[in-house]
Amino acid sequence: MPGTRKLGRASDHRKSMLRGLVTYLLETGKIETTVTRAKEVRAMAEKMITIAKEPSLAAKRQVLAYVTKEDVVKKLFDEIAPKYADVNGGYTRIIKTGPRRGDAAEMCIIELVGNEAQKEDKKSKK
């Protein structure tokens, strides 16, 4: 597992929560969560996208072992991974949105980066 944050949970609960968050991120393209959770989700989501870039049965089984919904795995292999075929990492973006009202935890939005946005960023840097 890429991250080492415990997130205040037992290991089985933590792994289950991260699997659910990664699945939902790949399903919808965007989720709102705390910054520490988002950093953990980013690591695993980018790992799943990198594995899915190779369209083999072994890669599909590796992703199915982590992602909890089969239709999300199909979407990952058919739609998401081909978009990032020529990109090495940096598939997600974390945008901080401020503190949560109840406990003042730092909140953020984590989303998948589109290729159009990356091309515009490169043009603006030049």
Image (spheres, rainbow, N blue to C red):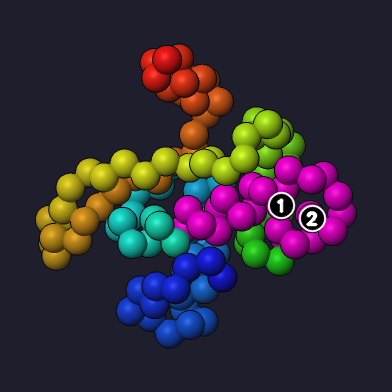
Taking depth in this image into account, of 96 and 126 the one nearest to the observer is 126
Q: Which residue sits at x=74%, y=37%? A: 78
Label 2 vs label 1: CA separation? 6 Å
Is residue 60 positioned above or below 86 on the image? below
Question: Residue 61 in magenta?
Answer: yes
On screen, residue 94 versus residue 90, left or right, reads: left
Pick whichever of labels 2 and 1 is earlier in the sequence: 1
Which quadrant holds the N terminus? bottom right
Pointer 1 residue: 51
- Magenta residue span: 41-64
Query: In what element is the residue under mark 2?
Result: helix
Dot label at residue 59: 2
In the picture as drawn, the residue positioned furthest to the front comes out as 126
Considering only vertical position in the picture, is 1 above or below 64?
Answer: below
User: Is residue 70 in the magenta section?
Assistant: no
Q: Residue at x 35, y 74 (%)?
A: 7
The residue located at (17%, 47%) in the rendering is 98
For the residue pair 79 and 92, the one nearer the viewer reads as: 92
Task: Count residues near mark 2 (Cα–Cα under 10 Å), then give few for <14, some for 14-19, many for 20+.
Answer: some
Instruction: State the residue at coordinates (29%, 48%).
Output: 108
Q: Is residue 61 visible?
A: yes
